[in-house]
Image: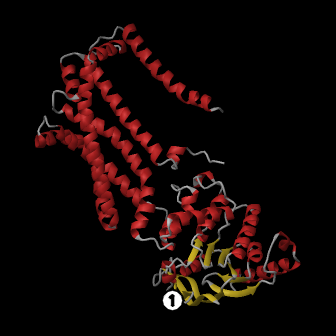
Amino acid sequence: MGREESWITRWLPPIILFFGGIFLWEAAVRGFQIEQFLLPAPSVIAGTFVENFERLVSIGWFTTKEALGGFVIGCTAGIVVAFATSRWTTASETLMPFAIAANSVPIIAFAPIVNNWFGVDNPLSKMVIVAIIVFFPMMINTVRGLTLVDAAQLELMRSYAAAPSEILFKLRLPNALPYMFNAFKIAASLSMIGAVVSEYFGGNRSALGIFITQEAAQFRFANAWAGIIIACIVGLAFYTVVVLVERLAIPWHSSVRGNNPGG
Amino acid sequence: MTILSINNVSKRFNAGSSNETVALQNINLTIESDEFVSIIGPSGCGKSTLLRVIGDLIAPSEGKVSIHGKSAAQSRLDQDYGMVFQAPVLLEWRRILPNVVLPMELAGIPKPEREKTARNLLAQVGLKGFERHYPWQLSGGMQQRVAIARALAIRPKLLLMDEPFGALDEMTRERMNLQLHDIWRESDTTVLFVTHSISEAVFLSTKIIVMSARPGQILEVIDIDLPRQRDDSTREDVRFFEQERAVREWLRRAESGG
C-alpha cells in the first residue's frame, strides 16, 4: 500500500464523520425546528463565532494561560516528587496509596475553597486547582516508569558496575519517558477541563468559564456554544502538541512507532 | 594461567525456610585462560545460578570465586568480564551503536574511541550498516549479535554467556556458533558458556562441564578431543559424534540423579 493511499484511508473516514455530524446537526435543527435556546444550529454558532471572534480569542487565551500555568506547576511538582521518592523505596511505597486515592477524588469540588484562598478573580486560584488535578496522574505514572524497570536490564547495568546515578539517568529515566508522556496527555486534557470548570464557580470576567455561564444565563446560547467550542479547540490543540512532542522525544517506543516489526 | 577459580561454592535459596532449595553444592572448578568451557546439564541444575555467582550478580551462600586472583565483586567493579544473557537485553531507546557503546560509556572511555571500537565490533559480528537502527528493527539473531558485540566492547578477559542462542532456530544457531568460535579464536578471551544443546557445546568447547540437578553439582569434566580450529566440516568429523555421544551419556546420568 502506497504512502498517499494509506494517508487517505486513515484520515478520510474521520473527516467524513466530522462533516457528516455537522450536517446532521444542522439538518436536525432545521427539520425538527428545534428552538435556539435548546440547540442552536451550527451555522448560527459559526455566525456568532465570526462576529465575536476577537473577544472569544482573548477570553480563550486568558483561560489557556491558567491551564498552561497549572499544567507546568502540577507536572513539575509531580515529576520532582516522583524522582525524590523513587530514590527511597519506602517513601514512594508510603506515598503511592495516598496518591492513587487522591487521584480518584473529584478535586474540582475544592474549587470554591481554593477560590476563597487565593481570591476569586486571581488566575492563580485556577492554576492551583489545575496543578492539583494534574499532579497525581503525573506523579503516579512517573514513579511507575522509574520503578517498573526490566530486571534483566538492571542486571546488565550491575554487571557493568554502573553507579546508582548512571542507573537512574541511563536506565530508569528513559524507561519512565513513555509513562510520563501518558501522564502529559492525561494532564493536557485535564488542565483545560480543570480551568474552565473551576471558572464556573466564579472568576474573572474575561475568563472562558465565566463567559459561558453568563451568556447561557442570559439566553445567548449561540455565544455560550461558541465559548464551548473555543474550549474544545484549545483542549485538542494542547493534546496534539503533547502527542507531537512525544513523537519527537520517544520515536523508539511502540506507542509511537506502531507494532509492525521492521526489516 | 588460571583465569577463574571456584572454591567450594554453594548456593541455597530461601535458606532456613521450609522451601529451601540447594541450587549449587560444593562447586570446585578451575578454568585456564584461552579455554572455551561449556556448562551443560538438565534444566534447573543451577547452570545460570553458577554464572551469576561468578559475575557477582548474586552472592554465594558459601565458598569463594576469584577471577584473575581478584574477588568476584572486585572484578565486576573493574569490568573484567562481559556477560551475554538468554535475551539480548538491549536498551530499546538506544540505537544499535549506542547500545554497543554503553559498557565503554560506563567505563569512562572517551567518545571517539568508544564509537570507533563499537563500529569495529559491529562489523565483526556482521552488522555493519545497522548502527543507526533501533533494536526493534532487528531480528532476534541480529539482536543477540549486538549483545555479543556489547559484551566484547570492554575487551573482557572472561566472557560469561548464559544460553545466548537458546531462542534461535537451528540454522541461525549454527551460523552464530561459527561466528562466536571465530571471535573467540581471534581474541584472547576465555569463554564460559551455559547451554542445553549437546552439539552446540561439543562444537564450541575445549572442555565441557556436566552438571546434575538438585543439588547442582559438577558430575564430570570432559576434555573435547577436536582440533582447536572448528568449521563446518567439524560437524561431520567422526570424533564430533563420539564426543557428542559421551556428553549425552553423562547427561543421562545427570538426569537420572548421578
The quadrant in which residue B213 appears is bottom right
Q: Is residue B87 visible?
A: no
Q: Is residue A47 left or right of residue B26?
A: left
Q: Is residue A48 visible?
A: yes
B143 over B47 or under it: above or below: above
Foreground: A213 or B130?
B130
The quadrant in which residue B162 appears is bottom right
Identify the residue at the far front of this view: B112
Counting labels gives 1
Q: Residues within 10 Å of mark 1 (few under 14, many from 20)?
A: some
| Kind of residue indicated by mark 1 | Glu
Residue A183 percent coordinates (x, y): 37, 47
The quadrant in which residue B149 appears is bottom right
Residue B244 percent coordinates (x, y): 80, 78
- Please report the residue visible at 38 percent of the width from the left and 37 percent of the height from the top: A239
B116 over B247 or under it: above or below: above
- Please report the residue visible at 64 percent of the width from the left and 32 percent of the height from the top: A2
Residue B135 percent coordinates (x, y): 58, 55
Q: Is residue B238 left or right of residue A33?
A: right
Residue B246 percent coordinates (x, y): 80, 82
Q: Which residue in the protein does label 1 denote?
A: B62
Q: Is residue A52 left or right of residue A148?
A: left
- Image quadrant for the N terminus of chain A? top right
A237 over B28 or under it: above or below: above
Label 1 element class: strand
- Please report the residue visible at 25 percent of the width from the left and 45 percent of the height from the top: A131
- Please report the residue visible at 42 percent of the width from the left and 55 percent of the height from the top: A176
Chain letter of the residue beneath label 1 in the structure image: B
